[in-house]
Amino acid sequence: MLNYLWLGLILCGVILGVLTGKTEAVTAATFDAAKSSLLSIALPLGAVMALWLGIMRLAEKSGAVERLSSFLRPLLTRLFPDVPPDHPAMGAMVMNIAANMLGLGNAATPLGLRAMQGLESLNPRSGTATNAMCTFLAINTSSVQLIPATAVGILAAAGAAHPTSIIGTSLVATTCSFVTGIVAVKLLQRLPMFALPPVTGRTPLPVTIDTAPESVSLIPLSLWKKLLLAVYVALFAGTIWHLVAARGAGTSLPISFVQSISVVAIPFLIGFFPLYAALKGISVYEEFIEGAKEGIQVALQIFPYLVAILVAVGVFRAAGGIDILTRLLSPLLDLIGLPPQVLPLVLVRPLSGSAATGLFAEIVKACGPDSYAAHLAGTILGGTETTLYVLAVYFGSVAIRRGRHALAAGLLADAAGVAASLVICRLVFR
C-alpha cells in the first residue's frame, strides 16, 4: 500500500505542477525536501539517538529496563504474543510508549527505533513487517498523548482565554484513535491480502540487542546506595511539587501534574539511569559510548526512506494538491460540520508534523484563538499522528520494504481521531 501511495503522490504532484504552471515550485520543493531530510531530520535525529541509545544501553546493562517492563508485561504479552516476555524489545517498547504519552518526542523516537531493532532480531522474513512490528507501529501512530503541549502552547501564545480547554477533547480523540488502531491492526492481520509469506532461509540483519543483565556481574544495591537513589528521586519529586504549586489555581491539578512531569522527565532519566548503572558496578562511560555508536548508523540507514517520503509530500503540496482537494471536498465538509479552514490540516497531518503545526498556527491567526475552528484544529493535532513519517522512519531503520497492514491501521486510527474530534468538539465548544 505504501508503494501505491508514494507513487500516487509523486505522479499527482508532477502532473498537477505541469497543468497549473507550478513546475518551478515543484522543482524547488523536490530539492528542498531532499536537503532537509538530511540536514533537518537525519543528522539531528542521529545526534539525539546517540544520546538516548547510550542511555538505553546503561538501562539495559543495569537491569533497569527489565524491571520496568515487568510492570506492563501482562498487557504486552497479550498485544505481542510473538515476542518473548523477557526480550529486550519489550523494555524498549514500554519506555517508548511512556515517552509518547508524556509528549517526549525527542526521547520516544530513539526508543521506538531501538524497539524495532529488537523486533527485527525475531523476524524470520527479511524485508517484511511482522505482526508485532505492525502492532507496535499502530500504537505509535495512535499513541495516547496526555497533554497536546504544542497545540496548547500555540493557543496560549495567541492569547486564548482558555488554552488548556482542548486537553480534554484531545484526550478523547487520541483514545478513540488508539482503540481503533489496535482493533484495526489485529483484524487486518487476519485478511488474506496481508498474510505473511512463507518463511525462507535468511540471515538475520546485524542487530545488536544486548541481554545485558545476564552477561554482566551486577553488584547488589546496599542500603546506602538505595538511600542515594531515594534522595535522587525525592529531589525530582520535590521539583514536580514545586512546579505544580507554581502553576497556581488557574490549572486543574491533574493537568498541572502531567505538565510538570513532562518538564522534569528527561533531566530525571538522563541522570537516573547512569547513576543506577554506576551503583550496579557498570562502567558507565564505556557502555554509553558503545550504545551511542548505534545512533549514527541508524540515522544513515533511514535517510533514503526519509528522502522518499518527504520529496513525495513536498512535490504534492507545492503543486497545489492540498488546495485542490480542499475545494473538491468542500460540499462534504458542510455535511459533517468541518470548517473549510481545518481540512488542509486534516490532509497534511498524516504526512508532515511540522507542516500540520504551521497550518494550525495559521488557523489560530486567521480565525482567532477562541474560535471553534481553532479548538477543533487543536484537538485534531493532539489526537492524531504523522503516520507516513512514522512508518518511513521506523520501517527504514530495519530495512522493511513490505509494511503489510501497518499503513491501513494507522490511517484508520487517524480517521477515527478526526471523527472523534468532530463529535467531541461539537458537544463541548458549540
Image (cartoon, grey):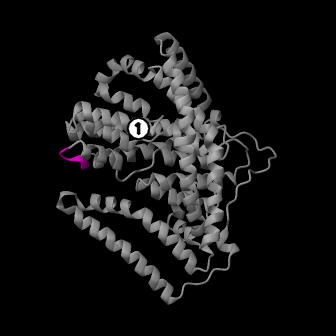
Q: Residue at x 73, y 44 (%)?
A: 126
Of 305 and 157, which appears nearest the observer? 157
Q: Residue furthest bottom?
A: 223
Q: Quadrant location of the C terminus?
A: top left
Say left or right for 331 vs 75. Answer: left
Which residue is identified by label 1?
416
Amino acid type of the residue tagged 1 in the rendering: Ala
Residue 302 spot, x, y in % from top left: 62, 43
Q: Residue at x 28, y 65 (%)?
A: 243
Say left or right for 97 vs 207. Answer: left
Can residue 163 be found in the magenta stretch? yes
Residue segment shown in magenta = 160-165
Can residue 176 be found in the magenta stretch? no
Q: Is residue 227 visible?
A: yes
Q: Quarter-wise, where is residue 335 in the image? A: top left
Count of labels shown? Answer: 1
Q: Residue at x 56, y 29 (%)?
A: 31
Residue 258 spot, x, y in % from top left: 33, 60
Q: Secondary structure at mark 1?
A: helix
Q: Is residue 202 above or below residue 223?
A: above
Q: Quarter-wise, where is residue 331 in the image? A: top left
Of 156 and 162, which appears nearest the observer? 156
Q: Is residue 408 above or below residue 299?
A: above
Residue 428 spot, x, y in % from top left: 22, 41
Q: Quadrant location of the N terminus?
A: top right
